[in-house]
Image: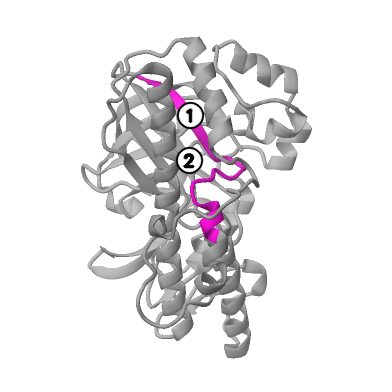
Amino acid sequence: MTTEKIPLCLWSDDLDPEALAQARNLANLPCAFHHVALMADAHVGYGMPIGGVFATVDAVIPNAVGVDIGCGMQAVQTGLARVAPAACKKIVTQLRKSIPLGFQHHKIPQQQASMPRIPAGPDLPVLVSEFERARYQLGTLGGGNHFLELQQGSDNHVYLMVHSGSRNLGYQVATYYNKAASRLAGEQQEMIPKSWQLALLPLCSDLGQHYLAEMEYCVAFAWANRRMMMQIFQEIVTDVTGCDQFHAPLDVAHNYAALEKHFGSHVWVHRKGATRAGADELGIIPGSQGSSSFIVRGLGNPQSFCSCSHGAGRVLGRKEARRKLDFKTEVARLNSRKILHSLRRQSDLDEAPGAYKDIGQVIDNQRDLITVVTRLEPLAVVKG
């Protein structure tokens, strides 16, 4: 039986064996602090489970942040109480015309003033090489589980929601520094098996400090990316419905590392597919395509490092979903709820409802971490 140096705390009753093995690897790292927390949506990822929260001392781990640095959610409450089906169709059509989806980018670079400010100090290698390309990607959705969604709230308001991240910039930063950490581990002969995919960067090193700076830039870029798309979303809704009342956006990231104080120590909390849920802090937990999303309020539970899940969590891998799910059944499931959805072909089944856990059960499993403020039902979904 594997023995961990620090405990594991789980909010999931159906964690797959591979994700559990990854959590045990985390718990045996030399920089590991106090315990490893696995949220209700946890499932296997690269190195560290997605839906994991892990704190370190004097080190940062690129693969414990992930490749889509700063990925997160933005939600806006509108002045609308309802949206007619015909208006939903017009909004979806305009979104597809106005926002590049999947691998598409803008044909011209976005204004440099719309990009986050470049941090002062030494040149950051990935940002220097990728900055101009990133200007073409600002305000683009990407693929995978990223989405634009029109939702009906339990508070009798219509909501707009955007899920996206730092696009190729975050991927390049993650890849560059994970490779650098792997080389460093090899040179120093660290007692971390390469197969764990958890090479670390000491924070006393230039590499460690450069990673933090580039990671934080990616978090800022991801926020700016979501905000630009949300502004376009709002303009389209105004054009179609005449509504020009929009609350301030609620924006939360769920892939990043941050210096925080927990259990009496200042540590680097890595949230990889996890949302911060401090006491009275608002967060967003989206469902899968065709299921509810939630605005939640954190309870500040120290056992989760003041965190909660970032979504429903996958129950089937992407290839497995395309192989096992029935296309007609999944489409009928969405059509029965009169949702304008994005299931067009067999290859889209990786984002079908059946590929994800039951969001209701995921919420119930973390009632000690959050309380539900507003339940949001999907009206129309645009995916990459």
- Report x, y in % for residue 247: 26, 32
Front residue of 203 and 70: 70
Q: In this view, does 295 lie above or below 93?
A: below
Q: Name the residue under label 2.
A: 163
Q: At 52% across and 74% down in the image, what residue appears?
A: 128
Q: Mark 1 points at which residue?
A: 149
Q: Is residue 149 magenta?
A: yes
Front residue of 319 and 101: 101
Q: Which mark is residue 79?
A: none
Q: In this view, does 51 lie above or below 180?
A: above
Image quadrant where residue 354 sits:
top right
Residues under numbered marks 2 and 1 in contact, where contact means CB atoms less than 8 Å apart: yes
- Report x, y in % for residue 139: 49, 46
Bounds of the magenta segment: 134-153
Q: Is residue 202 among what the camera can see?
A: no
Image quadrant where residue 60 sits:
bottom left
Q: What is the spatial separation of the Cα atoms under label 2 and label 1, in whole angstroms?
A: 9 Å
